[in-house]
Amino acid sequence: MSKRILIVGSGFFGSVCARELADAGHHCQVIEKRDHIGGNCYTRYSEEADCHEHVYGAHIFHTNSQKIWDYVNRFASFNTYVNRVKAAHGNKIYSFPINLLTLHQLFGVNTPAEARSKVAADCVSNNNPKNMEEYCLATFGRTIYETFFYGYSLKQWNREPKDLPAAIARRVLIRYNFDDNYFADRFQGIPIGGYTAIFEKLLDGIQVDLGTDFFSDQENWIQKYDHVIFTGPIDAYFHRQFGALEYRSLRWETELLDKADAQGCAVVNHTDANIPYTRTYEHKHFDLAYTKDKTLLTKEYPLNWEPGKLEVYPVNTDKNQALYAQYSAAAQELAGKVTFGGRLGSYRYYDMHQVIGAALKTSADLIETWR
Ligand code: UDP
């Protein structure tokens, strides 16, 4: 039987669910509190730089899943961009993630074997690292930890790495060859024409009300629909009744510069603790678009989250996970009426492809339940 479904939020989780449920014959309405679709993946075209600005920070699509790659390729063609980051520390620039060139730059080693023994000698062995510092010391060694991780992570999370989970640093690779691809996935690229065009296609034919805040009339919104898919912060849905989950926020300063190329690549990580931003992005390099003598450069500054600021990252400490477990249990009790998803709805440090995978699974399950 056809259901009337309200979807709160138009990021990947909400938009993929809307597409799948609408295609299965259900009636979907999306509400979005911002004045645009796409959540933090939103991009806008800059005429002056002839490229798409990643307005809420760099988004590089990558996945190992043929199914997810085929799915997004229904809504966009991807260019051949590969994320080859550079890390700035002191007055030096290093290849990043850590690869044989980085190890050559740091230690003067030239071969995989020399590099392995140099790193091994710098490591503090530990079979069960309990935090980010222990993990970095055991995996990368002290020099790499101090050069690339300590200052960056302190800025990014406003916590000492010994007070952060090891899982955060597991996102970053070390390789003993010259492969400098930030990701180890089979598929990667930037959508030609920007991310916003993907959301326009996902939401084609579906009613979307922008500038509409679910929380201004929460009970009324819920009552009017058979089912609600909520992609905002899960603790906000429950009025933070068990306490506030912690988030990390970001702010961006973007300048249009009167030069063709400011930094020579899309992403530079700034790993010194005394430089207040963590990354700079030069947007034209994402699009591989080199037609203009002007360029857009963004500095990304980490911020403490407080109400009114953008929630960007969940902070996966034990304390927050314990609190999330309480919200998750409360969400389970509503399962017949409300589904929670996305980075904020499931309080997970998800990448885009993981959000899409979760949305496809969730929507398939709902369709099956209602069949
Ligand atoms: N990280 C770091 N130095 C770097 C890059 C990453 O210390 O140059 C740490 C930092 O704690 C960061 C985590 O590794 O939050 C994960 O990095 P990733 O690039 O995946 O961060 P994201 O793109 O999700 O912000």
Image: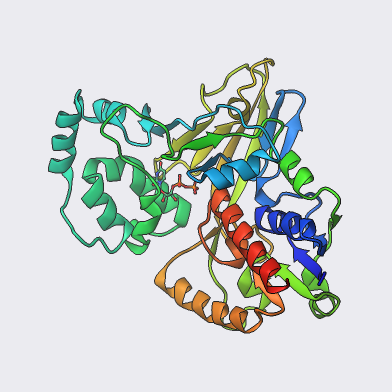
> In which image quadrant can residue 358 be found?
bottom right
Nearer to me, 316 or 159: 316
Q: Residue at (35%, 46%) from the top-left corner?
A: 149
Q: Residue at (67%, 15%) from the top-left corner?
A: 293
**Residue 155 placement, left or right of 50:** left
Nearer to me, 76 or 147: 76
x, y percentage for residue 206? Answer: 84, 54
- Number of on-image labels: 0
Q: Is residue 368 above or below residue 50?
A: below
**The N terminus sits in image quarter:** bottom right
Q: Residue at (67%, 69%) from the top-left corner?
A: 368
> In which image quadrant can residue 185 be found?
top left
x, y percentage for residue 256? Answer: 68, 27
Nearer to me, 299 or 218: 218
**Residue 369 placement, left or right of 85:** right
x, y percentage for residue 260? Answer: 62, 16
